[in-house]
Image: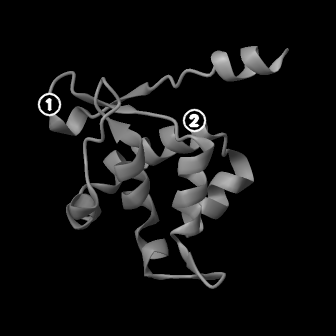
Amino acid sequence: MNRDKFFGTAKPQPVTVPMPETGDGESVLVWPLTAKEWTAFQAAQQTNGKPNKLADLVRERLVVACVRDESGQPLFTGDDIPALGEMPAGMIERIVNAALKLIGITGADAETFAKN
């Protein structure tokens, strides 16, 4: 592979996550984060190398970062984080699991993420 092919073929592909709780056939699109987005997401959870208050909202923040419409525009904003925290855990966890899989976090790494 050459450099041009490496950079030219990486097209983000969302996955559809069913949301049966919201009605017949409803779903959301979970988009993969770019390396830059993932780095910023991780950095926002720490202050001076220690977990900060955002670390408590990690699932909700990941939903905000990854759930987008068909054109890739965010479906939620940071203002939606408190409301997302009140949603059924199963709904949020399906989105989080899909996002982690797209990012490449599985197994023990996913368990570590879940503990945060």
Foreground of the two, 51 or 9: 9
Q: Quadrant of residue 43?
A: bottom right
Residue 43 lies, with reference to residue 76, above or below; the image says: below
Q: Mark 2 Cα within 10 Å, few/some/many (few <14, many 20+)? A: some
Q: Secondary structure at mark 1?
A: loop
The residue wearing badge 2 is 102
Foreground of the two, 24 or 30: 30
What residue do we see at 44% from left, 53% from top? 62
**Amino acid type, callout 2:** Leu
Q: Secondary structure at mark 2?
A: helix
Return the x and y of residue 84 as percentages of the image width and height: 26, 58
Q: Quadrant of residue 3?
A: top right
Labels 1 and 2: the sequence-earlier one: 1
Foreground of the two, 55 or 36: 36
The residue wearing badge 1 is 23
Residue 75 lies, with reference to residue 8, above or below; the image says: below
Nearer to us: label 1 or label 2: 2
**Amino acid type, callout 1:** Gly
Residue projecting furthest to the left: 23
